[in-house]
Image (spheres, rainbow, N blue to C red):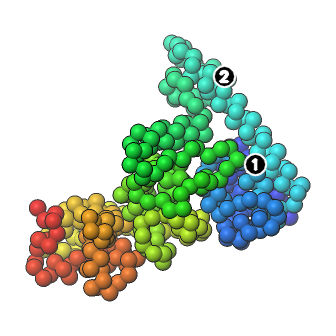
Amino acid sequence: MDDADRDPVPQVATAGEYVALLRDVRRRSGLTYRELARRASAAGHWLPPSTLATMLGRTTLPRERTVVALLAACGTPEAEVERWLEMRRDLEACLGERGRGESDADRTPAGPSTTAPATIPPSVGAVPPRFRAPWPARRWLRLALLAVLGVLTVGASGALRPLAPPTAGSSPTDGCPAVLRQGMYGPCVLTLQEHLMADGLSVLVDGWFGPDTTSRVMVFQAFGGLPVSGTADERLFDELAGDRKVPATWPEDQIGKHLRRTFPEDPAGAVRVARCLSGLDPYRVEVVEDGSRRWGLFQLSDVEVSRFRVDHRTALDPDWSIRAAREIWSRTGDFSRWGCAT
């Protein structure tokens, strides 16, 4: 069938499928997130790159106005836009009915019957008999708990006043500080972590800007050619909202094999030391007390990276890190230079 004969708005059954179709519309437009934001603004809509990236990176039903802004930026005819909105409203109604059905089923005590009622979807039977709020409600409950924790833990020090959860019509980054840094927590940090995950960096999405989040931010900055500050500002969010992805690194088994080949004199010791230093994570960056950083598998310092005359991106390459460690090891013939030589 030719593209001209194909239905421009195919039907879907889930919110995830709906978002997947929107991603396809954006892909076929050939426009970057920033270009779409500018075109949406010219058409009278509000569509920041970070909002667009967040919407297309999830599997939950997006807000109606964001859908309209994206479609308008892509040049979608008004008749098709209306069909997109009708499909979204149908899905919203269906999901609302399903959520109420699951809540009723969860409040019903489990009986001895071996046959589930026909009106209950099969997936409901696997849910323990307790009340489960729909996902958006659970997410805001989690954010509310983070805000309360902020009042109790950080309120006295003034490190960061917790932000109120966004309203239904706001952007995920509305009301955020100009710069996010380690020690902060709340909805803004949660959004940052979700972006890092979407761009290929594994990090715990818990709303807490801890050392692991700092490490991942510095990795993204290193690969993106940005100043490696470990803090998140507007420029970083713009880059996260773009198309750049951090390349996948080596899995643990590949790292182990390469270490054993490179250190035939003490293969087990090489793996043990690298695991102790970085957890065999080539994208591990640690900030020490004096503010300097340690990079990659063997946690080479800023000074060592500079002496090897490589940039931070190279310092995160597992092959380079292992070869550099071999050169350092050859001076003494052991792993005494590292603190994990036991």
Q: Position of residue 143 (x, y in %)?
A: 52, 42
Q: Can residue 33 be seen in this view?
A: yes
What residue does disc 2 label?
A: 118
State the residue at coordinates (85%, 55%).
80
- Disc 2 residue crowd, few under 14, some 14–19, many 20+, Cα 10 Å: few
Q: Quadrant of residue 29?
A: bottom right
Image position of 52 with respect to 227: above or below: above
Which corner quadrant holds the N terminus? bottom right
Q: Where is residue 299 in the image (x, y as percent from the top left)?
A: 27, 69
Q: In which quarter of the image is residue 317?
A: bottom left
State the residue at coordinates (70%, 33%).
96
What residue does disc 1 label?
A: 64
Residue type at mark 2 is Ala
Q: Where is residue 280 in the image (x, y as percent from the top left)?
A: 29, 63
Whether the residues at callouts 2 and 1 have beta carbons within 8 Å, the answer is no
Q: Is residue 323 visible?
A: no
Q: Which of 123 and 56 is in front in this view?
A: 56
Mark-to-mark CA distance, 2 and 1 = 33 Å
